[in-house]
Amino acid sequence: MESVLKKILATPEETGSALLIELVDSIRPKNPNVGEVATVNLHALITLLRTHPEYVVALRRYVLALFEVRRHSHLYADIGILSNEGFFTTVWNRFIFSILPPEIRDDYLKDTFGLVFHKHTDYLWVDQIPDAVWIELLQCIDFDAEPSHPGRAKIQEEMLNAVQMLSYRIASTGLEHELVRNYPDIERFESPFLAQNVEVCDYYRAYHACLSGDSALPDNKHILVLLQQCEEVLVKVRKQALHNGASISLTYHLQRVNQMIKRLQTLLVLLEPNETTIRSLALLRELVREENRKYSVRDVFTRVTDLVALQVTENAGKTGEHYAAATPGEYFSMLRSSMGAGFIVGFMALIKIGIGKMMLAPFTQTFFFSMNYAFGFLLIHIMHFTVATKQPAMTAATIAATVDQNTALNSGKAPLDGVVQLIAIVWRTQMVSILGNVILAIPTGMLIALIGYAAGAPVMSEEKAWHTLEDINPFYSLALIHAAIAGVCLFFAGLISGYYDNKCAYTRIPARLKQLHWLRKLLGEHRLDRFAAYIGDNLGALMGNFTFGIMLGSMGLIGFIFGLPFIDIRHVAFSSANFAFALVALDFRVGWQLVAISLLGIALIGIVNLAVSFCLALYVAMKARQVRFNRSGELFRMLGAHFVSNPREFFFPPKSGVALQNLAP
């Protein structure tokens, strides 16, 4: 460390960054997570400077000389702010730059800053050094001791240029079509995005005149008020997006303009004569962190996709409210609905077996399997029936919304009674829907098989029947692994459903359908209105069911192509129907032990289907809402106590059910 200071002292005309890089290297700890080492090293530097005043003068002039010969504005206006290239271009550029970084130009302070803090973990130890130590270092160097040095004036000039750059960018981004579309008042009334630019231009000219000694320092209060109004507009746009849908492009623009507003506010404060050192340190830490992570693709995804993920799970959550039976009426309605689905599943299972007998090529067979599943699930939805395993992806978002609305959960003050009651409702709803699927899928399958047997066309051979019973054996087959894969497919189907609901709202698909003249002539005015309204309410569910069917039909082929026998699916409703087919094919000549094991396998397949899709959906819903729930232990204890005191509520609704919307705090 002292050797570097001696070099700086020996080369007073030096303006290169090599010595500053070497000095920071001497402070940097080997383990970036151990901030105490960096603090000790910085204290050692402060001690050296206080012991040798000549080092202080040399270091001060060296740093000011670095500032004097470089352009600063891009450091203040670019680092930590998304580019104007758009989301996908930004992601691609970050990926390419992480492999082959762009050219480094020594005349830009931004590039010099990146060379000084060149370790991607530097922000960790910089954050951990206390403010008091940084302030002590700055007081020791004392840049105010040389007020006439050109480097000091350069800092103010470049910071002022950055203010102007950011102001123009905010004005242009604030008038992007995506923002105006979601908040038309930006065009109807005077836009704060444009008004702030007019004020900043006046401020820029007045500040330059002040630097020349011609006038007093201008006031920035009106600019800060306008920037606050810009932030209020962004909040309104986000609220509109919750109703009208969101897109990657809209979210990207919102993130970018918000970052620019925050940075402009910081720079305006730093240009004030009573600027605080604490604010300068906060900017330093932010710049180091963003410089270290400037090629992080994950950061862009995390920042930009949060709102879209929230919107997707929000739409799934709205659907999930229909999958939670709180009252006796809803409970028995769900039972009837799931029994209807079980009836249709019996015929879908029959068609699948028939396709398997056709000895088609693998790809062709997979296509017909997928279409059977897809159109069967579409029919179930159109008939307003319920497949039990479709529930978890929807109800998980509902639970996440309830947890999120309880704003005091993280502080540990709010009761969890509403969450416990909602989980009990979801549990009994899923149990009754599984029961409805199974109790009708099995007799439907038996009836179909008996009719086929009587007609001399058995549904399956004895060999196929034994193989079917082996496939649902939870002890001697991969049934539970296959059930878990089906649960993953269910999870993705829930996301796809939410995505298309969001897309339908955002792109105004119902209104666009009504504009099609050929469709109006085909259906007529009244039918077209009903059709557009139906698509608006059900596009997500239709696409989710269709893609879920394709995923179920394709998994077997994927496992076959890669030679991986554990890649396949087992679904509780289809396993029930296949079990019935197998019993009839074997003329019911099976022991009660095998029947019991098969029924246990069906039950476990259903539980795994539900558990996997529910856990994945709940994780994504909580993450999208940025909910940090740290009371899991308390929640499980309360669930256990509630089950012991009132087990009936987990299987049957109370006579006076609680409306679902009343469970949110």
Image (tube, rainbow, N blue to C red):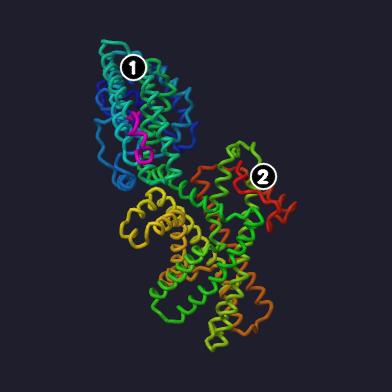
The answer to whether residue 180 is magenta is yes
Which residue was labeled with disc 1? Answer: 57
The residue positioned 56% from the left and 49% from the top of the image is: 398
Q: Which residue is mark 2?
A: 417
Check residue 310 for magenta coloring: no
Image quarter of the N terminus: top left
Q: Is residue 298 left or right of residue 396?
A: left
Magenta region: 179-193
Q: Visible in this render: residue 117?
A: no
- Residue 519, percent across and down? 34, 60
Amino acid beneath label 1: Val
Could you tell me how far apart the alpha carbons at marks 1 and 2 are, in whole angstroms?
A: 66 Å
Q: Which sits earlier in the primary sequence, circle 1 or circle 2?
A: 1
Q: Dot 1 lies on which element?
A: helix
The image shows residue 208, relative to residue 503, as above or below, that is: above
User: Does the magenta stretch mainly form a helix, a strand or a loop?
Assistant: helix
Which quadrant holds residue 367?
bottom left
Classify mark 2: residues with Cα within 10 Å, few (<14), some (14-19) or many (20+): some
Residue 577 screen position, x and y as percent: 57, 74
Q: Quadrant location of the C terminus?
A: top right
Q: Is residue 651 left or right of residue 234?
A: right
Q: Is residue 57 visible?
A: yes
Where residue 662 appears, x then y in whole percent? Answer: 62, 45
In this rendering, the answer to whether 46 lies above or below 467 is above
Is 34 in front, or is 246? 246
